[in-house]
């Protein structure tokens, strides 16, 4: 069974190395690599890897146990790309975590380590991703969606107020506890830093076409913060109904037509929902007019006319009395 060790470097190292969360003082500091830590003899936390949860060519997600506390953690191990190649998502995620700090609706990081080949992020283990629950239940009630969506909006506001856009919002990148009560946003490998106020970012790639803003899919210069708002709308639709507003992945025949209905205002969105059968008599998931209005405002095609993130909590559907 593999054992890895993370050590906290002296404070002055923080200025020379990439950084991590130190839960004790709630500061970001760099750790040396797991591989080198034991030989250095620094104060450390040790982790015993139990199994691999997920693995790709460039990254793996490991379930591990901290030896002292016996708590389970998740270790995300990402390979660094060669200099001059495509963006290094593992390193980028580490940098983003440093800038974000702690937030109750963002997955908590305990340690980070790196060497020449890998970046390893040790984070809290949360029960499951939201996609697994929504797929199994074919969507959640409006009341439950409202409860979770409020938390997601707070997490995204925390990012945006630090001039960071997520750009890969999806049910797969949201973690929830077993009671479906607490939400945590994760996976910041695609996140970018930009100045708010309408600045456009070039050369971005849409990761998930059914969640991504149309301007991002089409390769246009993107207001990344408004692109996140669009993804919020696509995500809320999926959360409520258990399927995407439209499917344009893999060249689906009716995907582009459904997309035109979804992005053309509340009246057209209602027609799309009706076509999907969500206004059938007796359907317990018939949407309220207020949630359809919010969806339409987030899914607006023109980014300049799309609702602003800070206006979403003021929308009637998210009224604190509900």
Image (cartoon, rainbow, N blue to C red):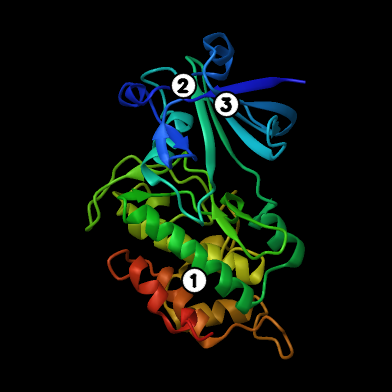
Place of residue 288 in the rendered image (x, y in percent of width and height, measured from the top left) = 56, 86
Place of residue 49 in the rendered image (x, y in percent of width and height, measured from the top left) = 72, 27
Residue most toward the top? Answer: 39
Place of residue 29 in the rendered image (x, y in percent of width and height, measured from the top left) = 41, 30
Mark 3 crowd level (few <14, some 14–19, many ≥20, 10 Å Cα): few
* Residues tagged 2 and 3 counted as in contact (Cβ below 8 A): yes
Pick the front one: 109 or 294: 109
Mark 2 crowd level (few <14, some 14–19, many ≥20, 10 Å Cα): some
Instruction: Point out the image quarter for the N terminus.
Output: top right
- Residue 322: image quadrant is bottom right
Q: Earlier in the sequence, mark 3 or mark 1?
A: 3
Q: From what the image shows, is residue 304 above or below residue 194?
A: below
Q: From what the image shows, is residue 107 above or below residue 197?
A: above
Determine which residue is flagged by label 3.
Answer: 58
* Left or right, residue 50 beside residue 293: right
Determine which residue is flagged by label 1.
Answer: 262
Pick the front one: 249 or 310: 310
Q: CA distance from mark 3 to mark 1?
A: 35 Å
Label 3 sits on a secondary structure element that is loop
Place of residue 203 in the rendered image (x, y in percent of width and height, measured from the top left) = 33, 39
Q: Is residue 261 visible?
A: yes
* Left or right, residue 289 beside residue 285: left
Tag nearer the camera, 1 or 2: 2
Q: Using the image, tell me which numbered label, if any, was put on residue 81.
A: 2
Q: Is residue 257 visible?
A: no
Tell me the residue at 40%/62% (across/down). Answer: 229
Tell me the residue at 36%/46% (across/down). Answer: 219
């Amino acid at each position: 069974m593999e054992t890895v060790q993370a050590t906290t470097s002296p404070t002055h190292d923080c200025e020379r190395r990439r950084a991590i969360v130190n839960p004790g003082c709630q500061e970001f500091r760099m750790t040396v690599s797991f591989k080198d830590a034991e030989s250095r003899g620094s104060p450390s936390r040790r982790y015993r890897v139990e199994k691999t949860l997920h693995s790709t060519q460039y990254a793996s997600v490991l379930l591990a146990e901290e030896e002292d506390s016996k708590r389970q953690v998740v270790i995300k191990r990402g390979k660094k790309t060669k200099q001059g190649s495509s963006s290094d998502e593992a390193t980028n995620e580490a940098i983003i975590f440093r800038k974000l700090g702690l937030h109750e609706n963002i997955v908590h990081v305990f340690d980070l380590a790196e060497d020449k080949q890998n970046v390893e992020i040790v984070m809290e283990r949360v029960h499951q991703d939201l996609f697994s629950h929504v797929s199994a239940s074919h969507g959640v009630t409006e009341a439950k969606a409202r409860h979770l969506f409020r938390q997601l909006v707070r997490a995204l506001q925390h990012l945006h107020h630090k001039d960071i856009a997520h750009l890969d919002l999806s049910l797969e990148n949201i973690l929830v506890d077993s009671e479906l009560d607490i939400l945590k946003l994760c996976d910041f490998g695609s996140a970018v830093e930009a100045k708010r106020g309408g600045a456009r970012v070039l050369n971005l790639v849409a990761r998930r076409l059914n969640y991504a803003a149309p301007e991002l899919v089409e390769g246009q210069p993107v207001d990344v913060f408004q692109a996140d708002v669009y993804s919020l709308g696509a995500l809320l639709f999926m959360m409520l109904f258990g399927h995407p507003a439209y499917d344009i992945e893999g060249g689906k025949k009716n995907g582009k037509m459904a997309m035109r209905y979804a992005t053309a205002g509340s009246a057209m969105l209602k027609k799309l929902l009706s076509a999907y059968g969500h206004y059938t008599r007796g359907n317990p998931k018939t949407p309220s007019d207020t949630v359809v209005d919010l969806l339409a405002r987030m899914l607006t095609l023109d980014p300049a006319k799309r609702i602003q993130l800070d206006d979403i909590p003021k929308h009637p559907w998210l009224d604190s009395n509900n």
